[in-house]
Image: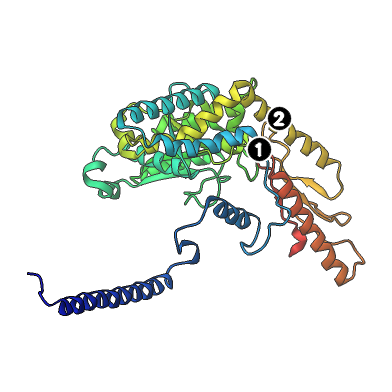
Amino acid sequence: QAIADPTLAEMGKNLKEAMKMLEDSQRRTEEENGKKLVSGDIPGPLQGSGQDMVSILQLVQNLMHGDEDEEPQSPRIQNIGEQGHMALLGHSLGAYISTLDKEKLRKLTTRILSDTTLWLCRIFRYENGCAYFHEEEREGLAKICRLAIHSRYEDFVVDGFNVLYNKKPVIYLSAAARPGLGQYLCNQDVAFLEKLIKDDVERGRLPLLLVANAGTAAVGHTDKIGRLKELCEQYGIWLHVEGVNLATLALGYVSSSVLAATKCDSMTMTPGPWLGLPAVPAVTLYKHDDPALTLVAGLTSNKPADKLRALPLWLSLQYLGLDGIVERIKHACQLSQRLQESLKKVNYIKILVEDELSSPVVVFRFFRELPGSDPVFKAVPAPNMTPSAVGRERHSCDALNRWVRSAAACLPFQVPGHPCPTCW
């Protein structure tokens, strides 16, 4: 109902407007105080309406080359080449592909996985194998261990680890294996290994898995894989092989010791370091007839995201082609041989491993030798050197070893230099 008195009507209108102004002012004050309170807990880059792309990339560049508050100084980023760009493209492309509808995604990921598996099996002479792609190099061995347990213990799915108490599984590793695998140590002597296996069987244990090496990155050692395979077949042991020498399976000539790895139950390969490809997964090739057990062990998956792990490698292998793959591996082996030949001519450099002719790994030590001393075990400063000169000598030796390691790291294969003994 309208107010008849115009004066009262005007007063009511003015009061309403005044109250609205006061309420709006109060609301704005509360909102500003709320923003200040919230922004105090939010890191700077997230405050406001966000950062533009250029600013974000500039921050990333500064973080890559030094402190984010400093200007980048003489960046030393490894040149990854076009094949590296192809591998990196795979990660971005994989994120985009994951947005496709389920049916298209299923078909595409299945094609990528099957293609990459077939190519790797053909290139590295592992016929009729399956493939598991993983980010961490040792993850494949862990899954293979689970598969071996499921295969040898029929009630493991139902009773779990309780079935292991009556017949404990045993895993055998070469004495030259990488540290950190939780090894059941055994000697490289195959006869001694066989004795260990017999002893374990007599004690009611179950020989489960044997991990052999085909060119360890530390010493370039290759186990007697052919003899180990015979031993594994005799006792029903799963044979797994890993090592840098597996890369040479792609070459025309392969030593018999490495070629024997093609008969193993599984092998883990690292095509990224072998081919100079960044951010590509490691691959574990294996042979097993029961798809249900491989699924339970985690070696196969129906998730498209898991299948897309192979995408960077799928793109890179197509880009390089067979000729490019073989040429890169051959070139890396030739570089290692040239490095070894050159180091033999340098004073104070001792080649520690020379009997592994097929290995692309070069192991050496920088030392100062006294007349009549054993250069492998004794490394001391030259005589008549003052303590200060000794310190400078040790510093120079350490600096040289660090430089050699950093320079060798650019090669597709690892060429480790041992630390200088004089640092002690």
Identify the residue position indicated by label 1 in the image.
412
Identify the residue position indicated by label 2 in the image.
331
Residue 81 position by quadrant: top right
| Dot 2 crowding, Cα within 10 Å, few <14, some 14–19, many 20+ | few
User: Which residue ends up furthest to the left in the rendered image?
Assistant: 1
- 1 left or right of 62 in image: left
Q: Amino acid at mark 1?
A: Pro
Which callout, 1 or 2, points at the residue further toward the start of the chain?
A: 2
Question: 344 above or below 395?
Answer: above
Question: 319 above or below 43?
Answer: above
Residue in the foreground of this view, choosing between 52 and 412? 52
Q: Position of residue 77 (x, y in %)?
A: 67, 47
Q: Position of residue 241 (x, y in %)?
A: 51, 35
Asked if marks 1 and 2 touch (Cβ < 8 Å), the reply is yes
Indicate the secondary structure of the residue bearing disc 2: helix
Q: Amino acid at mark 2?
A: His
Q: Quadrant of the C terminus?
A: bottom right
Residue in the foreground of this view, choosing between 380 and 36? 36
Question: 100 above or below 168?
Answer: above
- 238 left or right of 421 in image: left
Q: Residue at x 38, y 32 (%)?
A: 236
User: Which residue ends up furthest to the right in the rendered image?
Assistant: 384
State the scheme by which the image is colored.
Answer: rainbow
Q: Quadrant of the N terminus?
A: bottom left
Q: Is residue 281 visible?
A: yes
